[in-house]
Every structure is written in C-alpha cells, then in structure tokens.
Image: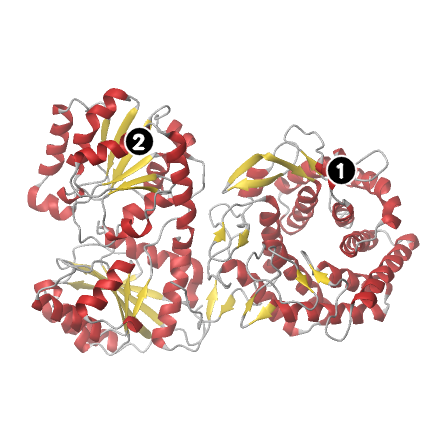
Amino acid sequence: MKSLGSKTILLMSSYPPRECGLATFSNDIVNSVKLVFGDSLPIEVCALQKEVNQFDYGLEVHYALTVSLIDEYRLLAEKINNRDDIGMVCIEHEFGLYGGDYGNYLLSFLLAINKPIATVFHTVLPGPNNKLKKIVQAIIDLSNKIVVLTKRSQEILIRDYDCKESKLRIIPHGTHMVLWDQKEKLKREFNYSGKTVLSTFGLISDNKNIETVLSALPKIIEKHPEVIYLVIGKTHPEILKRDGEKYRNMLIETTKKLKIENNVFFVNEFLELKQLLNYLILSDVYLFASKDPNQAVSGTFAYAMSCGCAIISTPIAHATEVLNPGIGILLNGFDNQEEFQRAILELVENKEKRLEMGRNGYALTHETTWENIALRYASLFAEITEGKEKLRLNFPPIKLDHIKELTTDYGILQFSKFSQPDLSSGYTLDDNARALIDMVMYYDKSSDYLALDLAKIYLNFIAEIQREDGRFDNYKDINRQLTKQNELVNLQDSNGRALWSLGFLLSYQEKLPTDLVEQAQKIWDKAIVHIDEVTSPRAIAYTLKGLYYYYQANKEGEIKTAITQLADTLLNHYHINSDDDWCWYEDYMTYANNVLPEAMLFSFLVTGNLKYKKIALITFDFLLSHYFMKGELSVISNRGWFIKGEKKNTYGEQPIEVSTTIATLHLFYRVTGNVKYRNQLNLAFSWFLGNNRLNQIIYNSVNGASYDGLEEKNVNINQGAESTLCFFKAQLIMNEYKDYDKYRHLDTTITYAI
C-alpha cells in the first residue's frame, strides 16, 4: 500500500529493453528507490523512444514519448498535468536523446508542464555556441533543480551557462554492491585461472578507442603471455544501424595483424547485470580509453571501480576527480598508445600495487552504491516537492550468508577484511557468545535447523575455551591456541557475556535439543560458582542478564538471591558516581552502555523491587538524552569515551552500541508500554538504513552483514563478527514489529554534504 499522501515521481528517460547506458542508469535508479523505500516513494517511467511502439516495456513504464514528434511533448505534458498524484518529473538529459537542435524539442514539454522539475545533465559541454547556450539555459530556467554527476559539470554550468550554484546538486553515478575477494573464484569459473585479465566494457563504438589499447598490447603480451584482454559488450544499436559491424570487424582484423588474436576476446553480448559484474570482478585491470574530452561521466568506469579493478583511464572529468594514484593511473592524453603501454605494463608487473588500487577503489565507491544514491535522490525529490509527508525505509531481508562465511568448524572468526574473513584475527569468546544468542533467537523465530548447527559450533567453542576451574579465556588464534592477550586484559566482561549466552540458551530448553541443553548446563554449572568475583559494572550487567534468563526456566532461590546481590552492587555503583547532572553507574560511558539499565530492569522483573525499576528508568532516559538528537541516533564514539563533565565525542559510531540500544528499547517498551521507546526503536534501527550522520547505508544487502562503523567522512566497510551479529540481532528484534509498523519514517529535511 502507498503511504497516505505519497506522491509519484515520474522519471523521463530511455529505458530497458532499449540498450544504452542511460537506460541502464535509469533502471538502476528505479530499482534502488524501490529497494530502499518500497511503495512509500512510488516511481513511474516515461520511456523515450525514436519510433512509435519501438519496445515492449515493463509495468513501471506508464508513458512512452517518441522523441522525433514535437507535438507529442506537449500532449505528454497535458496528460501528466491531469494527474494529481504525480508530484514531480525527473528528466534524464543527454545530447542526442531528445529531438530537434541540441534536443530543443524538450522545451515544448517544459513550457507545458505544471509539475516541479529536476533535470539531470549527464553531459555538460564547455564553451557552447550561442544556440546551445540558450537551449541549456532555458532548460535550467524551467527546472526547479539541476543535478550533475561531477564537480567539473557543476563548474561548467556555473561558468559557461550562468547557472546559480544554489540550483545545482551533485549526485554521483551509482554503483552496485558486490562482495570482496571473489576474483580468483570467478577466474576459475570462467577458465581464466593464471591469467592477468584486462577488460573494457560497454556498448562498442569508435569513441571507445579500443584500437589504441590493442596497439599497446603486442609488446606486453610478448613479455607476459598470460595477459588477456576482454572487450565486453555489443555494438551500440545506433552504430549498428548506421555502419553495421564495421568498427568491430576492424578491431578483430587489428588483433590478427598484431598477432594477438589468441589473447584478445570479444564478448559480443548485452550482458545481464550479474554476468557483467562477474566479468568486472574477475578483471585485474580495467581500461577506459574514451577519446572524448567532453565526456563527463562513465558508468562503466564507476562499475569497474566498485568491483575492485585497478583502473587505467584517459582524463575525462569523472576520472580526473576520483582517480588518485592509490586507485589507478590517470593518463595525460586521449590517444596515446605508448602511455597505455607503460601504464598497463606497470600494473601487470606489480600485482601488489594493482591489488591495493583495487581495494582502495572498492572502498571509495561504497558511498555511491545505488542504495546510497537512492537516499540522495529521495532527499532531492522531497526538497523539490516541498513534501511534508515522511519517507519510509524498507525493512531489509534477514540473511545468514556472512555469519556462515565467518564460521569455521571451530567457531566464528573475529574480523573481516571487507567481506573476506580474516583468518589471522582468530576467535573470541565474546563473538561466539554473541553468535550463540543470535542463533537461539533465530531458531526460536524460524525453526531453521541451520541455526541449530551453527549454535552447536558456538557452544562447543565456549566449552573448549572454559578453564578447568570454570572461568573462561577470551582469545584463541587461528591454530586454536590461547593467545597472550588473555594474560594482558581483564576478562570479566567476556566471562559475564558467556554466562549471558548460556543462560539465554537454557531459557529455551523446552524448544532445543537435549544434547545442546545438557552441554550448556554443564558449562553453566562450572562457571556460576565464580559470580561473586564479578566487580565491574558491565560484567555485573552481563552476569545479571544471564541469571535473569536462567531464572525463566529454573526458578531457583539461589539464583534470585544472586540477582539481588549483584543488582545491589550495581545500584551502589550508581549512587557513588551519579549526581544531579550525571545519572549513571560510572563517571564515564564506554561501549554497550545500554546493558547497565537493561540489567537493572531485568533485576526488577525477577525481584519485583521497585528501586531497581526506578534507577533503570532514570539511567536509561539519561543515556537516551545523549543518544537521540535532531531526528537521528548518535551513539558514544569509540574514538574516546564520554567522560563525566566533558563533551561527547563524535564519529566512530559502532553497530554494537546501536544494537544494544535497540535491545534495551525493546525491553523497556515491553515492560512500560511507553510509546516513546517504541518510536525510538524505529529511529535507532533506521541508523543502519541510512538515517545517520553521513546518510549512508550501514549494512551489506548482498550478504546480510553490517559494516564496522560510521567514521568522520566514511563508513568502515569491514564486516566483522561483532558488527554483523549485532545487526542480525537488531533485525530479529525489529522483525517483531513489522506488522505494526513495517517501515522507519525518515526525516526528509536531511541535507547531504557534497
């Protein structure tokens, strides 16, 4: 269902099944908006075509404009004007796309339409003649906002077309999210193992300048016969119509003349997205050889970066802005065979350098994934329509993929380099305890036996790392040996977290296999004798949580007594450290702060003692007052703890803090029924979905992982166990609220820093 008062966005562009870069771009825009916002931001398409009934379109295409018929522009505008549900029109502009001189037929539409307009200029020509300048200026004047894809395009519009900077927005070309470290796997699948793969892709035309690359290859291949070059893509339909396969045939003949035909392969297809991305992922070096100095942006260039290719490019505006020496090699000219040869040879002969370039490019393009670009366009649309209604973010599907990837037969690994498990990081009790809790929760909600298989692995790890006296170590290396770190750090928090996971499992003993329950009980019995040794507030809180859950299935007087003793100790910490302006258990806030008031409320639920409830509410509300500001969540930074009497640090926000906030809000809402906690639940979870300081997605939609943190200017896109497990748990909690409020309402007044 559409949200009340939602307006439809009409996108005007070429569109599949038409085969061109702009059609692909527009299809990606539509798909990403639907993925991120669902039906709360309806989007329809007006497809541009050269002939009447040229294509059979999908259901999202509601109009088709034959661009060579000038009267059709006015008639289309009248149809749109008659629809009250259309809030605005977004026009994708490229020279040659619309009829008339420099596409001036578009002005007939703009003069007749009475809806707000955003025009996206994909190409901006510098130094225009008088006629071109007047046409572009008219488009600018008749549009509410102008979008460009590069800073260079923005500069040209301001300098050469007198466009006001306030009217302009820069929204980069989108990229697709892919998993890291699939290169060798895909090379094997495509029978390219042992090869150094160069590639170029896109609709083929002489502007691609592929012959210059071919001319650079003979000396390289002579020295490195393992080098192959993939030319991926069909001939451009307009070129094919005009010249047939003349250009492609010339390229094929060139490979024969140069005697490199056994190392150059033409993939003469318009590839499906997944297949295209696979080709790019397996490529070591992407070659962008365009000879058009006025080309502003390239989707092929952006896609190659996001797939982890090292890049060699001619100096189009897009490349000059993003291609620093850490990502690739920017050439000086547009048609220089020797420059290409030197650059290719440099990367072919330096594997570490090209891998590092690929890593850097992959990391840089996270902020331009289509999900993040959808957030930017949605913000722009809301600004143009002056819409007061809220956008709603879709609930992402729950996926176990990355958790499985991180899990060996021994336990879950601690860290990840991007999406690749980092074996050198080894294992921790902390993460395996978190994973055990998640899998018990997931099994309870899904009855998926895979969750039980994983839970057994994590429980075995906990048993393995328990000492003979019942205490636990925390760290093991990849060889399953205890590390010296266990001797250097305080292990109370880890021991408390282990008890929490065991108590949580045992609270579900009626639903779980007997062997799992008996093993957990055995570990619990050895560990519980040490709870009197726990002194730190956070370790006390973890232990209290374990005792609370254990008590749900085992109403033992000793457990209730232990809860009272530990809760009183935690309460004493509060009385020692709190004052009128600082309602907290310590004189600083660190990580997972929410577990302290959460444990206090759990203590109330077991004992019925109102003093625990009172302090739980006071301290949780105090914490929330520092977390929720200006319509978004901003948690304690890992760059420096929040010290009593000092200012809270910004940046360095981590998923663990957001997830524990969600878990505690969930508990407090259930216990108190206070709707403010329910509303803050929505707001907290939306942090993962892009409602954060950088307005970027914090989860990986491909594998279900969470990124490791929100830094000052970027997202840390490593995907470690802690972050992923915390996001997974947050999803399981929020899944309980989907029927009541499936979406998080997003403040549409968000501004995006460029």
Marks counted in the figure total: 2
What kind of residue is marked 1? Answer: Glu
Residue 664 percent across, percent down from the top left: 69, 62
Which residue is at 31% across, 43% downward? Answer: 272
Label 2 crowd (10 A; few <14 / some 14-19 / many >=20) = some
Indicate the amino acid at tag 2: Glu
* Residue found at x 75% / y 33%: 464
Q: Is residue 184 visible?
A: yes
Residue 131 placement (x, y as % from top left): 8, 68
Residue 153 appears left or right of 416: left
* Circle 1 residue: 487
Quarter that holds the N terminus: bottom left
Classify mark 2: helix, strand or loop: helix
Colour mapping:
secondary structure
217 up-or-down from 598: above or below: above
Quadrant in which residue 350 is drawn: top left
Q: Using the numbered discs, state the Cα–Cα distance from disc 1 to disc 2 in whole angstroms.
A: 47 Å
SS of the residue at dot 1? helix
**Tag 2 or tag 1, which sits nearer the N-term?**
2
Query: At which x and y percent is residue 284?
Result: 34, 34
Does residue 100 appear anywhere in the picture? no
* Pick the front one: 103 or 241: 103
Pinpoint residue 650: horizontal percent, then vertical percent.
56, 62
Residue 492 as seen in the image, left or right of residue 325: right
> Between 232 and 630, which is closer to the camera in this rendering?
630
The front one of 349 and 602 is 349
Residue 346 shows which numbered tag? 2
Q: Is residue 655 above or below residue 12?
A: above
Tell me the number on the disc at residue 515. none
Left or right: 514 in relation to 187: right
In this picture, is 135 found above or below 499?
Answer: below
Q: Quadrant of residue 357?
A: top left
